[in-house]
Image (cartoon, coloured by chain):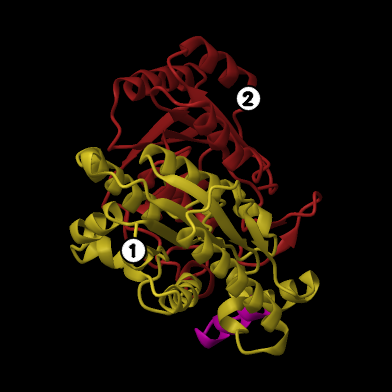
């Protein structure tokens, strides 16, 4: 079983190292083989909003950089973990960049979900389970609730956790999540 | 403070390289009203700022601004990575210049391709959170649904109502800046005056048509390049 861990090279704080170690140990105990990638400020490049991944080279970004390999590993993993600093209540710039450049993996069209909201349909029949763990020091209630809302209000199969030094809480929560591929309900 | 000296920084945060963006169009509309109101305007294009070595001048302008208007497209339900980079870098700059803080007023204009304007709310909250970090005063956001139509159908009769709503929203923003508004303001939601089903139909047809122009067949849009059988890890 393959798991991909995406983290931010710019925020290598003590909390990050502790969290990364915790997550690594947990997944290895669960029998995963791990691929780790750290995102820097210049690599990969920013999405340029061209939609080439939908209408020029469907399913692949037209920018030839590290992100192509990340998306390939992403689609062939059982599980992807994003370890993201919480910045202004959102993902950091580097982590957000990988999320922006994830869109080749979905289709351009519109569909209406059961709750009436709009989403792009899935390109593939299954996706890795995605878990986002936000970390940071002295985060306000506004920042933490916003970080949860950004994903939980709009995505259906993505889990969001917050790490503020409580190892036990993260381990227990991860233990309760089914760590395997999910279907098309993005 | 003398009204004429008020300085507005307009930030266009579209990640696009060259083609005209919806954020650019919205900024142009806002700029027109800022000029009519006789205010000073400083324009920033985030991509150009970051990649053409303009950040220092632009950050100085932001530091001296009476108001900042941040315009951007919604990317995966929040701010595009390129705008986060710009704001993170500005925050680092700001931390070293806190003695010069001017407590600017901050406004967000967010447009999304989906028809529902309300999905922009979390992005507006991010700008609110950023404003608090830099000791600025967040006022309100303008949340636009179906933003893709602003460019494509801007000259059609059914878009007149939308453009009128946009003008009103920008006028409200100018008035708030000029009058140093204190009252709590709700975010403004603007949706296209267009049936959702027809919007989907036209949007979906647009993808097929653009793909065809690129020499692709309809079925090519559904390619699965990373399908397990195609790759070796």
Pointer 1: what residue?
B7
Q: Chain of mark 2?
A: A
Q: Which of the pair A22/B104 is nearer the observer?
A: B104
Q: Is residue A120 visible?
A: no
Q: Answer above or below: position of B175 versus A172.
A: below
Q: Answer above or below: position of A12 versus A100.
A: above
Name the residue: 54% across, 44% down. B125
Q: Which of the pair B149/B209 is nearer the observer?
A: B149
Res A177 label: 2
Q: Answer above or below: position of A72 versus B224.
A: above
The stretch in magenta equals: B205-218
Q: Which chain is yellow?
A: B
Q: Which chain is red?
A: A
Verify whether residue B214 appears in magenta: yes
Tag 1, which secondary structure?
strand
The answer to whether marks 2 and 1 sit on the same chain is no
């Amino acid at each position: 079983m393959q798991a991909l861990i995406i983290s931010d090279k710019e925020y290598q704080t003590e909390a990050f190292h502790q969290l990364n170690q915790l997550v690594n140990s947990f997944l290895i105990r669960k029998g995963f083989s791990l691929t780790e990638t750290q995102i820097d400020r210049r690599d990969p490049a920013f999405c340029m909003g061209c939609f080439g991944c939908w209408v020029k080279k469907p399913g692949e970004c037209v920018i030839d950089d590290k992100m192509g390999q990340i998306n390939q590993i992403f689609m062939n993993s059982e599980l992807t973990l994003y370890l993201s600093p919480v910045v202004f209540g959102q993902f950091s710039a580097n982590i957000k960049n990988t999320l922006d450049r994830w869109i080749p993996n979905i289709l351009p069209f519109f569909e209406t979900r059961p709750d009436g909201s709009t989403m792009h349909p899935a390109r593939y029949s299954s996706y890795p389970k995605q878990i986002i763990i936000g970390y940071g020091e002295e985060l306000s209630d506004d920042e933490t609730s916003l970080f949860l809302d950004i994903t939980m209000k709009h995505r259906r199969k993505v889990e969001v956790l917050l790490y503020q030094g409580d190892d036990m809480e993260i381990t227990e929560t991860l233990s309760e999540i089914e760590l395997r591929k999910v279907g098309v309900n993005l | 403070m003398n009204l004429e000296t008020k300085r507005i920084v307009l930030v266009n945060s579209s990640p696009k390289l060259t083609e005209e963006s919806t954020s650019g169009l919205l900024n142009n509309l806002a700029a027109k009203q800022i000029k009519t109101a006789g205010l000073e305007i400083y324009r920033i294009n985030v991509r150009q700022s970051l990649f053409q070595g303009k950040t220092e001048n632009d950050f100085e302008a932001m530091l001296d601004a009476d108001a900042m208007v941040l315009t951007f497209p919604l990317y995966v339900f929040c701010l595009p990575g390129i705008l986060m980079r710009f704001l993170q870098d500005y925050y680092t700059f700001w931390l070293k210049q806190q003695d010069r803080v001017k407590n600017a007023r901050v406004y967000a204009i967010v447009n999304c391709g989906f028809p529902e304007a309300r999905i922009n709310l979390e992005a507006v909250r991010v700008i609110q959170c950023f404003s608090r970090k830099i000791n600025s005063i967040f006022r309100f956001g303008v949340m636009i649904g179906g933003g893709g139509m602003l460019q494509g159908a801007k000259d059609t009769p059914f878009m007149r109502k939308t453009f009128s709503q946009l003008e009103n929203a920008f006028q409200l923003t100018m008035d708030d800046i000029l009058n140093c508004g204190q009252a709590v303001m709700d975010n403004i939601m603007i949706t296209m005056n267009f049936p959702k089903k027809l919007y989907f139909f036209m949007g979906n047809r647009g993808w097929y048509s653009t793909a065809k122009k690129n020499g692709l067949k309809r079925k090519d849009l559904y390619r699965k390049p990373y399908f397990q059988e195609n790759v070796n890890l």
